[in-house]
Amino acid sequence: MKTGNRLWIFVLIVVFLLSSCAPPDTQGMEVRDAWARPAARGGNGAVYFVIRSSAADEIVGVTSDVAEAVEMHESKMSGDVMEMHQLESVTLPAGEDVTFEPGGLHIMLIGLKRELKLGDVFEITFRFKNHEDLKVSVAVQDTPASDKNHLANNH
């Protein structure tokens, strides 16, 4: 076998070994179907979506220019009363969808700086414990976004 052929085979083996040993993308983050209902300026609003992280992580904060304050909340039934509590963080198990929806987890927009009208789009920014910040576009609509309407998708 010629030296050039041996070198070529060696290079192919090294490339194969390096590609098969590369760590998986453990920082992948996907946010789907982000939406908010219309809301009046000065009032409050809520954002709903589905989020999935390829590695275990936590949402530790959310910001947006459309509101004076942005908080993570969870609504739960306590007997006959729906109670809402602010959360400091939300755990994201690896590879599992976490759904923010009416009557459950949601992002509260407190003290809206502008009216949120049907058809508007605004941004929120997620802060994570182990992942870089992620900006997400949110559509203002009456009902949840469909699976076909991926407004934010960052891997």
Image: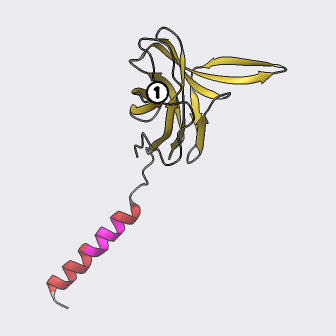
Residue 122 sits above or below residue 55 on the image = above
Residue 13 magenta-highlighted: yes
At x 42%, y 11%, the residue is: 113
Q: How is the image coloured?
A: secondary structure
Question: Which of the 4 quarters of the picture holds residue 77?
Answer: top right
Which one is nearer the viewer's eye here, 44 or 99? 44
In x, y percent, where is residue 6? 21, 83
In-image side of 23 versus 14 (left or right): right
Q: Residue furthest right?
A: 79
In x, y percent, where is residue 1? 20, 91
Question: Which of the 4 quarters of the picture holds residue 125?
Answer: top left
Q: What's the amino acid at mark 1?
A: Leu
Which one is nearer the viewer's eye here, 85 or 19? 85
Q: What secondary structure characterizes most of the magenta part?
A: helix
Residue 15 magenta-highlighted: yes
At x 15%, y 84%, the residue is: 3
Which one is nearer the viewer's eye here, 58 or 20? 58
At x 49%, y 49%, the residue is: 148
Question: Which of the 4 quarters of the picture holds residue 22?
Answer: bottom left
Residue 151 sits above or below residue 7 on the image = above
The residue wearing badge 1 is: 118
Callout 1 crowding tier (Cα within 10 Å): few <14, some 14–19, many ≥20: some
At x 54%, y 14%, the residue is: 44
- Boundaries of the magenta span: 12-18
